[in-house]
Amino acid sequence: MSAQPIRHVQTEVLTTTQDEVLRLGREVIGVESRAIAGLVSKLDANFFRAVCLLRQLRGNLIVTGMGKAGLIGQKLAATFASTGTRAHFLHPAEAQHGDLGRVRLGDVVLVLSQSGETGEVVGLLPSLSQLGVPLIAISSSANSTLGKKADITIELGDMAEACALGLAPSTSTTAMLAVGDALALVVSRLQNFQAEDFALNHPGGSLGQKLSHVEDHMRPLDECRVAQQDETIRQVLVACTKPGRRTGAIILTDSEGRLTGMFTDSDLARLIETRNDAALDRPIREVMKTSPTTIESGARMSAAVVILEEQKISELPVVDADGALQGIIDVTDVLGMLPETEAKENSTTGTHPMRIYPFDQYAD
């Protein structure tokens, strides 16, 4: 029995032209975009009052809404929380069965309802009033039940849903999202929310990594190949062995532990290619790369990524303010933060394109 609806859908798609599908899609986006554009002129003193209230917030922002508006509310709670305003989502139906205990004096409640008459939301209003918490409403009208009970109502006005039946929340929820984002980001900006604060709330993923500090990702000295600049190349190569995955560079220091240079696998390869075997028994300082690019501890990984990318280097020593070596950023440890380049497909093996990072600080 399930096969018939599938065949019906396939037939319908095949008889609908691409132009018609694109027209319908553009129509939906057009309806929603015009509604968003209309909100620009609708923002008034109530938006200002809401921002002022949120800036004075001492507790938590509690966001609530039912159905599709509730899903928008969950997203807005996450946006507020990530940009400096403590926020949680409260399901209005669950609130009437115990979850209302999450709301405390000092909190502010942000209520989303296009009609302002949603049963679960309206049923919550007397309890919120008893708790004495201020209410901000995002709704179509201040004359709705919600609008009349709220301390501040940001009116969206009447708007046609993009749904062909005019029923499915689409335009209205898009408008709620836009107004909620505006509230969150304006409050964040006025509170002077900085990249450092953002980093604390985003420790994971590529974004969080780039906002972290270099010392969080560098290999500490005990994991690096470090040698004295006066030792011979042969001595250094024999002594500088480390278990596990090693870096492609040996870090050279003076007697006081200050960075003086680097000797890379590429440097060794050039000596071998030119058959300069005698150099292996000469002090490594004679062939090392002097004054390598460094980054100071405390710098953000975003700055390190820029250096690695722009200078096409594989190892970036980390030093303190006095130039003392702290560790090294190895490109293989931070591949996910770098713009990727794709090699051409290997025509002999038929393998898929490989993602490579062709960085070598001291390649010719």
Image: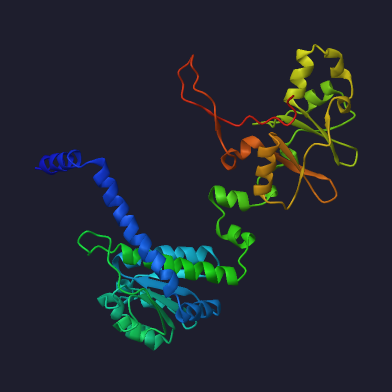
Left or right of 325, for residue 150:
left
Going 60% across and 66% down the picture, which residue do you hit?
A: 193
Residue 287 found in image quarter: top right
Residue 344 placed where, x, y %? 52, 23
Vertical comparison of 271 with 62: above or below? above
Residue 363 placed where, x, y %? 73, 26
Left or right of 277, for residue 208:
left
Vertical comparison of 45 with 29: above or below? below
Going 28% across and 60% down the picture, which residue do you hit?
A: 162
Residue 73 in sight: no
Most foreground residue, 107 or 23? 23
Q: Split into 4 quadrants, where in the image is the C terminus?
A: top right
Going 78% across and 24% down the picture, which residue do you hit?
A: 237
Residue 174 placed where, x, y %? 36, 63
Residue 26 in sight: yes
Left or right of 360, for residue 231:
right
Vertical comparison of 330 with 50: above or below? above
Vertical comparison of 90 with 277: above or below? below
Most foreground residue, 212 or 281? 212
